[in-house]
């Protein structure tokens, strides 16, 4: 028997007033319990009990040992219960790193609802435009473009990778709208910053052919929000995720262009996923938050 279990048995014996009763409380026979206590005494080189045929009483060393270990074991038991509860009930601090442009629209507005349902969870949210992030170093959940490589992670799709080519009504009134992918070249395009290469917008034409268009324009940024605002201000054409522009299109602030031709930026067509480490027993706080995001996500996205 391991020492921790033997110490629990020792305290149970003092509490129950007998070895047999203490053993039964731990699923041990009287013989096994008695043998375990003698082995503990041998291991500690201490006599813990004065024994008679009808009664056991702690020695002075036994009383002192009990006084020292009882609060320690109670604290250990409380810690184990708390850890177990974290897998059963959502509690503790949930640390999230999320893509800023998505989180501001589709995560932050739903935090209050999550907290109302799970008041024992505190949320630590970091926003970033970096790509390739994975859960690590104390991060419970990452909301990112695409799935990371490897079997260590589990991903949950929150939004599709569909993009919309748009411009503001004011821009179209002044400059017209392109009638084909080739005509896009005649318009200023607002693009994500690329490293040492022209940004590519990819179109699928009516017969299924892929057409790559090397676009250029007066403004580029690593922020989708900045590109969206530039499009709203009439600076040119923009190709951004449906989850970012859907409300602008619905309210008429932006007008879709070439809507029958699927399009995407050559290097950015990934879906949005919530990613956490793969685990047989996922902490309840993570599972609850992912379920909440999936429940409020647009099913058509």
Image (spheres, grey):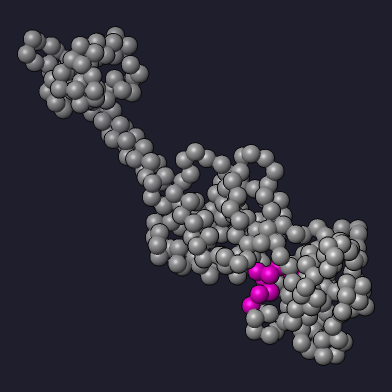
Residue at x-position 33% and y-position 23%: 4
Above or below, 196 relative to 239: above
Picture quadrant of residue 265? bottom right
Assess whether residue 242 is covered by the magenta stretch: yes
Apparent side of residue 22 relative to residue 279 in the rendered image (left or right): left
| Residues shaded magenta | 240-247
Task: Give how far across and how far down residue 152 sits, in percent.
Answer: 61, 39
Q: Tell me, yes or no, whether the highlighted magenta stretch contains residue 54.
A: no
| Foreground residue among 39 and 20 | 20
Q: Nearer the viewer, residue 69 or 253?
A: 253
- Is residue 53 positioned above or below 97 on the image? above
- Whether residue 139 appears in this view of the structure is no
- Residue 196 x/y as whole percent: 91, 58
Which residue is most to the left? Answer: 54
Q: Give the quadrant of the C terminus.
A: bottom right
Quadrant occupied by the N terminus? top left
Residue 46 lies left or right of residue 218; in this view the side is: left
Pick the front one: 185 or 118 = 185
Q: Magenta region, mostly helix, strand or loop?
A: helix
Direction from residue 224 to residue 23 in the image, left or right: left
User: Count the marks: how many?
Assistant: 0
Residue at image coords 60%, 67%: 300
**Visible residue check, residue 268:** yes
Image spot of residue 117 (x, y percent):
40, 62
Q: Nearer the viewer, residue 52 or 281?
A: 281
Identity of the residue drawn at 34% across and 40% down:
81
Q: Is residue 76 above or below residue 292?
A: above
**For residue 14, side relative to residue 234 (left or right):** left
Residue 236 occupies quadrant:
bottom right
């Amino acid at each position: 028997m391991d020492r921790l279990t033997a110490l629990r048995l020792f305290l149970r014996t003092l509490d129950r007033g007998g070895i047999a009763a203490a053993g039964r409380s731990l699923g041990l026979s009287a013989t096994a319990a008695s043998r375990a206590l003698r082995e503990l005494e041998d291991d500690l080189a201490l006599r813990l009990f004065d024994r008679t045929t009808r009664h056991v009483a702690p020695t002075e060393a036994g009383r002192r040992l009990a006084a020292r270990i009882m609060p320690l074991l109670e604290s250990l038991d409380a810690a184990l219960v708390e850890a177990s509860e974290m897998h059963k009930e959502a509690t503790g601090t949930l640390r999230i790193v999320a893509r800023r442009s998505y989180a501001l629209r589709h995560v932050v507005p739903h935090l209050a609802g999550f907290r109302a349902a799970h008041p024992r969870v505190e949320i630590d949210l970091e926003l970033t435009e970096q790509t390739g992030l994975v859960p690590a170093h104390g991060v419970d959940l990452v909301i990112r473009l695409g799935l990371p490589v490897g079997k260590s992670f589990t991903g949950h799709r929150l939004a599709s990778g569909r993009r919309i080519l748009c411009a503001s009504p004011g821009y179209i009134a002044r400059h017209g709208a392109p009638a084909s992918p080739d005509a896009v070249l005649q318009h200023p395009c607002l693009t994500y910053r690329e490293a040492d290469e022209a940004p590519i917008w990819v179109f699928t034409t009516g017969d299924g052919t892929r057409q790559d268009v090397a676009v250029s324009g007066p403004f580029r940024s690593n922020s989708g929000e900045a590109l969206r605002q530039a499009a709203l201000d009439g600076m040119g054409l923009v190709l951004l995720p449906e989850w970012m522009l859907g409300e602008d299109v619905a309210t008429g602030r932006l007008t879709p262009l070439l809507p029958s031709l699927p399009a995407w930026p050559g290097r950015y067509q990934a879906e949005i996923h919530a990613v956490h480490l793969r685990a047989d027993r996922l902490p309840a706080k993570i599972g609850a938050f992912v379920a909440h995001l999936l429940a409020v996500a647009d099913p058509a996205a």
